[in-house]
Image: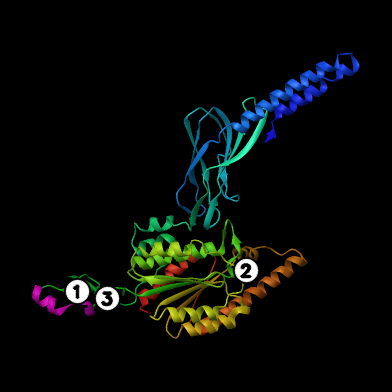
Amino acid sequence: MRPAPLLIALLALWGLSGLPVLFFGVPAWAWWVAGGALALVVLFDAWRLRASPTPEVAREIPDALPLGVERDVHLRVESLVRQRVDVYDLHPGDWPAQGLPRRLALAPATVSRFGYRLQPSARGDAVFPGVQLRLRSPLRLWRQSRVAGAPQTVRVYPDFAPLARYALFSAEQASRLMGAHLKRRRGEGTDFHQMREYRVGDSLRQIDWKATARSRKLISREYQDEKNQQLVMLIDTGRRMMAREGELAHFDHVLNASLVVSYLALRQGDAAGLMASGGQSRWVAPLRSLGAIDNLLRASYDLQPQPVATDYLAAATELSLRQRRRALVMLVTNVRDEDIEDLLAAVRLLQRRHLVCVASLRERALDDALREEVHDVPGAIRAGALARYLEQRSAAHDLLRSHRVMVLDVTAEQLPAALVERYLAVKRDGLL
């Protein structure tokens, strides 16, 4: 319990009222009587505040929230007596909030309801310890802080709104919306789809001569890309993914892109799985149904990169033991020249059974630095160091390509479209 500004002002006024006692002969007992009366009023007001019941508070918030998207949170405050109260929800401290604190005048046996905007800034489990209330005494001489409401835990997932938007389109249409550039098909798919009438441009190999003879008109077979193939996203949770660009870390971009390409693979009839290795580890076996995206979300929403070096060879060994069927393995990391020996050994181990694609994230700051003009010696030194770093990075990528590894050198913004484009290219070329 703390004194309110009004109480401090009254005490100051009572102190100043002692000046007439010193200089004008006013009886001292009058000053002490005034002080005693003030003390009784102050103590009585404090007792009333302490005896005042704590309002009941309930929070209305979804159990799952998307990362970086503002959501409405509603609070219900109910009091048995007339009270003045300031309300502040104890949300995670680094989350931006709008509409707090809120000052309420509560009537007896009524419910006050208000909302505020909250934007989650980190994935994982987030705890709301309660709601902080600052009560005022009836005479506004005291303030007291109390915590009401039950603790509540919510889960913050990657922003999966793009998945819902892509659900309205075919896989190829959705990939174009993401900016993926699709190449023309080389040849036909391998799975029979349907019979249809001949169209100009169909190859002679597509014509079904028996069906043509029966119907007395040209009938073509239509094929589609092979289904029921396997896609495994192998994502790095080590120190390379801790770099930040804007509001999100590289790992958040990687997770979002992995979920998008997995969703499109499921739309294509393939099975999608995920393995995280480096810091935190996680394994989700490939599944075919569209409901598998829920499994991927639940398994990965709380993954966070850790300041540890990633053991690529250990990750490849574990994946080889878990994933026996041939699959397209998309390893997303940030390739550095000092990691290339371990990474190359891991890739060659995976290539014994799987088709491997390595997506290497490039910091956007590198592209920005390349466009800067050099005007002094420190700038020239930075430019030389940057050129040397990019040369070593390019040499590491070339070494991987020399071992028949598909390599994507992209920024975080380019990653989703690049992964989708490469996945569809593998499907179209029948590489699996």
Crowding near the residue tagged with mark 2, few <14, some 14–19, many ≥20 C-alpha atoms within 10 Å: few
Res 354 → quadrant: bottom left
Q: Nearer the viewer, residue 373 or 238?
A: 238
Q: Which residue is disc 1 drawn over? A: 220
Return the residue at label 3: 191
Seen from the viewer's position, the closer of residues 102 and 408 is: 102
Residue 280 lies, with reference to residue 39, above or below; the image says: below
At mark 2, the secondary structure is loop
Mark 1 neighbour class, 10 Å CA radius: few under 14, some 14 to 19, many 20 or more: many
- First along the sequence among labels 2 and 1: 1
Estimate the x, y position of residue 74 in percent, counting from the top left. Answer: 48, 41
Q: Which residue is mark 2?
A: 307
Amino acid on which disc 1 is placed: Ser
Describe the element under mark 3 as helix, strand or loop. Answer: strand
Segment tinted magenta in the rendering: 204-215
Closer to the camera, 170 or 251?
251
Q: Is residue 286 visible?
A: yes
User: Which label sits in the foreground, 3 or 1?
Assistant: 3
Image location of residue 256, percent across then percent down: 48, 62
Q: CA distance from mark 3 to mark 1?
A: 14 Å
Badge nearest the viewer, 2 or 3: 2
Q: Position of residue 69 (x, y in %)?
A: 50, 51
Q: Amino acid at mark 3?
A: Asp
Distance in Å between CA atoms under marks 2 and 1? 58 Å
Density class for disc 3 (Cα within 10 Å; few <14, some 14-19, many ≥20) is few
Q: Residue at x 45, y 49 (%)?
A: 62
Visible in this render: residue 179?
A: no
Is residue 209 on the magenta stretch? yes
